[in-house]
Image (cartoon, rainbow, N blue to C red):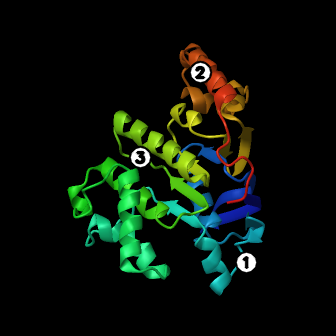
Amino acid sequence: MIQVIDLYSTLGEQKVLEGVSVRVSRGEILALIGKSGVGKSVLLKHIVALMKGQKGKVLIDGEDITSAKGRKLEVLRSRIGFLFQGGALFDSLTLYDNVAFPLREKAKMKEVEVQERVLYELEQVGLKGMEHKYPAELSGGMRKRASLARCMVTTPEIMLFDEPTTGLDPITAHSINELIKGTHERACFTGIIVSHEIPDIFFLVDKVAMLHEGKIVAFGTPLDIMRSSHPIVRQFITGGREDMEDMLVPVIGKLEEDFKEKGKCYAGEKR
């Protein structure tokens, strides 16, 4: 569903992506991990064509979004939802109007249909009855939920999450991860999540890719990454602490159990 092929990108004089290649199958969620500043968010922006690389391609269901223009680009982007790190809600609009915004802008729907969709998505993210509130009246976790509702109201086939739990306390962060997991089970989108929540994020995703110095240095299942002997991967997973190795043993055991039980909500079928 998403295929990045030999992508190179710079920011001014700084080389950010140097030949990145990665693919995400339909219905899977990929965790994109790595140290701060290595280009994870930049990669997401290339996938939705908010940035253009110097070389390489990004294919969305076989279509090259890097060369798409006009109506074709608009159609490809309409299949993608993007949950920005800060939520990107409009401060001057109520929660209801924020979620309704993409439908009113792009969809030819009657207001009664818009209302039905908006209230349904707000209920799904646990914000039923709060549609009259403004973003400033919401907690950080509630703003993340509202942003997810705004993304899902257009039923995207692909969801990109740029550090969805940044700035949240551990309990709220866990609840947001669980919400994303439940939303994926309901909607069966293909997803990429940029996250530093190790190892929590591993229980949410199907595959993991680690970005380091402009390249993907590790790719595989969460179990593959947890068992990896690659020094850069091990340092990142343990935070450079030797005493963390023993603490990760039960995590690997739990991942093994989850791997055996995990089903595929999409069953290989095209949405």
Identify residue type, mark 2.
Answer: Lys
112 on left or right of 131: right
Label 1 CA crowd tier, 10 Å (few <14, some 14–19, many 20+): few
Q: Is residue 262 visible?
A: yes
Q: Residue furthest bottom?
A: 70
Identify residue type, mark 3.
Answer: Thr
Measuring from the top left, give residue 19's x and y in whole percent.
76, 57
Residue 230 picture quarter: top right
Identify residue type, mark 1.
Answer: Ser
Would you place residue 126 above or below residue 119 in this image?
Answer: above
CB within 8 Å, label 2 to label 1? no
Camera-nearest residue between 102 and 243: 102
Label 2 CA crowd tier, 10 Å (few <14, some 14–19, many 20+): few
Q: Is residue 147 visible?
A: no
Camera-nearest residue between 91 and 78: 78
Whole-Å distance between the Cαs marked 3 and 2? 25 Å
Q: Quadrant of the C terminus?
A: bottom right
Q: Residue at x 41, y 46 (%)?
A: 166
Whole-Å distance between the Cαs marked 2 and 1? 43 Å
Which dot marks residue 67? 1
According to the image, label 3 marks what residue? 166
Q: Residue at x 35, y 65 (%)?
A: 89
According to the image, label 2 marks what residue? 254
Q: Considering the numbered disc 1 on the image, is that residue within a helix, a strand or a loop?
A: loop
Measuring from the top left, give residue 14's x and y in whole percent.
62, 61
Q: Considering the numbered disc 3 on the image, is that residue within a helix, a strand or a loop?
A: loop
195 on left or right of 141: right
Mark nearer the viewer, 2 or 1: 2
Q: Quadrant of the N terminus?
A: bottom right
